[in-house]
Image (cartoon, rainbow, N blue to C red):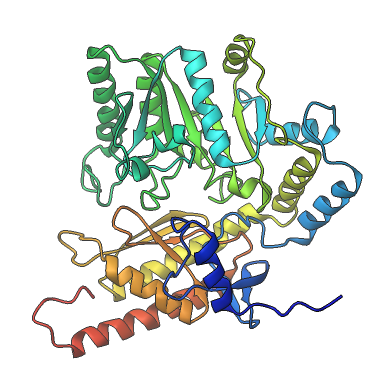
Amino acid sequence: MRAVQPRSRQQTLALRRQLVGSSCKLFFPTDPVKITEAKGQYMYDENGRQYLDCINNVAHVGHCHPDVVKAAHEQNQLLNTNSRYLHDNMVDYAERLSKTLPEKLCIFYFLNSGSEANDLALRLARQYTKHQDVIVLDHAYHGHLTSLIDISPYKFRNLEGQKEWVHVAPVPDTYRGLYRENHEDPVTAYADEVKNIIEHAQKRGRKIAAFFVESLPSVGGQIIPPAGYFQKVAEHVHKAGGVFIADEIQVGFGRVGRHFWAFQLQGEDFIPDIVTMGKPIGNGHPLACVATTKEIAEAFAATGVEYFNTFGGNPVSCAIGLAVLDVIEKEHLQAHATEVGNFLMKTLKEQQIKHPIIGDVRGCGLFIGVDLIKDQAERTPATAEAEELVTRLKEKYILLSTDGPGRNVLKFKPPMCFNMEDAKFVVETIDQILTDMEKECLSQKKTTVCST
C-alpha cells in the first residue's frame, strides 16, 4: 500500500476553508494550530511541539486517558447497539450517577450531546408545568439547536432576536453587574430581578415553565453566582409554577473541586428540578445525560409518546462514562482540582496587585476567570489586550481562550490533570507577557492612558 504523505498545516487549512462552513471558527484564526496528538493536559502539533491545554474541559480526566481508551476499546469489541436492548452498562452507569446527586434526582435520560440534553430538559419542563415561557440569564449559551438558540442571548441577539416567551434576567455578577461587591445584599437584589420578570410576565398572561441557568455562567464571563441566589430564585420560580434547570454541561463532574456538581456551591439546601450534563461526561466521547425527578419523568411519559434516542446510552458510551467516574475517584481529581485551583487563584491574584490590567480573579477549582480591564474606575473590558495576551501565550505554547460579553475574560478550564507546575508556568508566562506589554505601551508615548 502506498504511503500517504502527511499534509502541511497550510494544506489542511486550505482544505478546511474550501470544504467546511466558514461559520465554524478556529482558535487563533489568523495563525491556527494543527493538533495531531494529545495526552493528559498536553497537545502536540504536526511538528511534535508540546502545548499546555488550558481550554479543554471536554477532555475532562485528560486527553486519551488510557483507562477511558481501554474501556471504549474493550466494549467496542463486544457490542455497540441502541438502547432498546437490555444492557448492564446503562443501568450500572445510571446507578453510579445517582450516587453523586441528591436523592430526589433519580431518573436519567441518556443522549449524545449537551445540546440534546438541554433540548430534552426544555421539553420535560414544559410537559410537567404545562407552561411555555423560559427565564434565562443575559449572555447565556445553552446549545446550538433551534430551541436552544431561542433561549441563548449570546446567540439570538445576533440573529432573529428575543422571542415573546423568553425572558432575560441580569447575570448575578458582583464584579461588573447591576449589583456589585459593595451592595448590601446582592443575592436578594439579583433574585428580585427574576421575581420582577415573573410578575411582569404574569400581568401579560404569560406562564413560566422554567428558569434555565448554567450553574456557573461560562460564556457570560466565568461568573460565580453568590451563594443563596439559586435558592431565592427557585422559590420565585416554583411559586410561579415553573421548574429550576441547572445546566452543568461546562462545569460538572468535580471541576469545582470541593463538590461534584457546581450547583452544590449554593448550599446543601438547594436541589434543582432538572440537571443536564455533557462535555466532560464522556472525556471527548459523544455522551450526555438529563437527571430529573420521578414526578417530572412521569408527566413526560404520560403523553404516551415514546422518547427514543438511537445511540443515547449505548454500551460503549456508558462504558466510557463509567471509566470517567472511575478515574475521577481513583486519581482524586476533585481534591486535585481544589489544591491546584486554589494555588492558581492565589498566584493570579498576586499578579492582580502587580498588573492593573487585571481587574478581577474569580473561580472555584479548575474553573477560573481573569477579567482584564482598561481602567479601574469604569472596569472597561480590555478586549484587544486580552486577544493580544492569548496570542502571545500561544507563541509560548500555552493554549488559553477568552470569553465574556467583552471577550476580555481569560477562561481557565483545563483538563483536570492540570498540575502545580503547569499553573506556575502559566502564571509566570502571563506575568512576563503583561510586563512586556506594559513596557511597549510606555515606549509608544501615546497621549492616551495605556490600559496597563
Q: Nearer the viewer, residue 95 or 443?
A: 443
Relative to 9, residue 342 above or below: above
Relative to 94, residue 48 above or below: below
Where does residue 436 sit, x and y in percent of width and height? 32, 85
Residue at screen point 58% across, 12% down? 299
Where does residue 186 sit, x and y in percent of width and height? 26, 39
User: In the shown orientation, is residue 408 left or right of residue 285?
Assistant: left
User: In the shown orientation, is residue 270 left or right of residue 66?
Assistant: left
Q: Nearer the viewer, residue 174 or 202?
A: 202
Q: Quadrant of the N terminus?
A: bottom right
Q: Nearer the viewer, residue 223 or 443?
A: 443
Identity of the residue furthest to the left in this view: 447
Residue at screen point 59% across, 14% down? 295
User: In the shown orientation, is residue 241 left or right of residue 283?
Assistant: left
Relative to 174, residue 348 above or below: below
Q: Quadrant of residue 315?
A: top right
Q: Quadrant of the C terminus?
A: bottom left
Where does residue 47 sit, x and y in percent of width and height? 63, 83
User: In the shown orientation, is residue 12 left or right of residue 17?
Assistant: right
